[in-house]
Image (tube, rainbow, N blue to C red):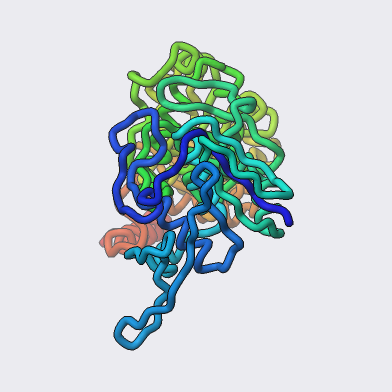
Amino acid sequence: MKYLKISNAGEIENAALYLLASTKRGQSGKIGQFGSGNKYQLCFFARNHYDYKVFAGTREIEISTVPTQLRDQTVNVIYIDGKETSLTDQMGPSWKLWQAIREIYCNAIDEGGQRIEVVDEIVPVHGETQFYIGFNASIQDFMDNFHQYFANDEDVIFSCSVGRILRKRGDKRANIYRKGIKCYDASKDSVFDYDLYDIEINESRTIERDWQLYEGIWKLIQSCTDEEIIFQIFSKLLKDDVLEGETGFLCTLRNTFFQSEEFKRFLSERRIIPITYASFLTVEELANYIVIPQKIYSEFKIQIKKDKVFDDVKSKGNVLYRTVIPSPMIEATLNRALEFFKECDLEIPYDIQVAKFEDRKIYGTTDDNIIVLSDIGIERGIQETIDSIIEEYIHIKYNCFDKTREMQSAIIREWIGYMKKKNTYLI
């Protein structure tokens, strides 16, 4: 029969399997800290009826369960070497197989001399602790995806006091580690994988707070001294909807304490634009920019050189637009509309600019005493253009806003005034 065997130097004491206490808390070089993991993994294998054996040297530690009545329920109490413990197989109900195996292997790493392998027979060795778990398809899947649960030193492409950046191994889903051990079930892909050293985890050995995850990742990115890695991350923040682009976090990215000279140089030398502005650029213009989420752009904008910042976009309230050179067709339509006003003897004393609006349903706005018309609106024809000019003309002349009583009164006043003028009528 095949087993997954996990071993380490030294012989485990029985109490380590049932006593809720930690001898590792506060030791920076150790992975464990809660003192409950060994108990949860034991309960997981008991609850799921695995063929599971533990050896302290050549001595097998016998593990069994005994049904016990607790009020109106029957619970399976775990016995070790015939001694009743306070553990039941219901502990750690949300634990999964990978967490249970991870716990054993983490303890092995802490003890030193760790090994994990598939074997055909049980061979206890003096001076070692050995765990044997009956092999099945689920364990095979775990071993096939071992790199998802434990960071591989061969994949490290950058490291510092904050943590390590690791290259991807085929799968796009983000792999997040704490001291080399998986600690997060990611739902998003990522540009790279990350091993964070200083991040809080709960008793399930998973990250306690998401914002700490994003903060840790960005501390690591800002500390990076490899500009190619930084470029890869920034260039894919938006395009691939990756974990690095997550902006729903509370930390402040713009922390110069963590910024390497390479990171600062990257920001100062690249043309970076927020997604909010991307729609204003032509395909040719976009080729010269890296498009990133608005939140991240806002955090780093102050560090981008002025000649690299795209500042052609203007705002009026919540309306964003960029003035453009009108095409021949737009220019001809606009001229025809202005001719109509001349024919009607209606003076439009304000300059008119053509713009591309972020909201394509908006056909016009004003900028001080300038009428700004949407290219889309003008393309709809002369009548739409005339309507837009009249509306914005009234906005400027009477300083009133859409959907207000003042706007209604202004339109009536302008219309009556025009008729009086045309008929030289005095009231």
Q: Residue at x 35, y 19 (%)?
A: 256
Q: From this viewpoint, is residue 61 visible? A: yes
Residue 403 image point, x, y percent: 35, 63
Residue 159 is left or right of residue 75, and the answer is right
Q: Which residue is drawn at 64% across and 53% down?
A: 381
Vertical placement of 259 versus 400: above or below? Answer: above
**Depth order, front residue of 217/343:** 217
Q: Which residue is drawn at 43% across and 49% down?
A: 206
Q: Which residue is drawn at 35% across and 83% down?
A: 69
**Depth order, front residue of 107/304:** 107
Vertical placement of 356 versus 418: above or below? Answer: above
**Depth order, front residue of 97/422:** 97
Q: From this viewpoint, is residue 393 visible? A: no
Residue 52 image point, x, y percent: 57, 58
**Depth order, front residue of 21/358:** 21
Quadrant for the N terminus in the image: bottom right
**Exactly how many numbered labels are in the figure?**
0
Residue 2 image point, x, y percent: 72, 53
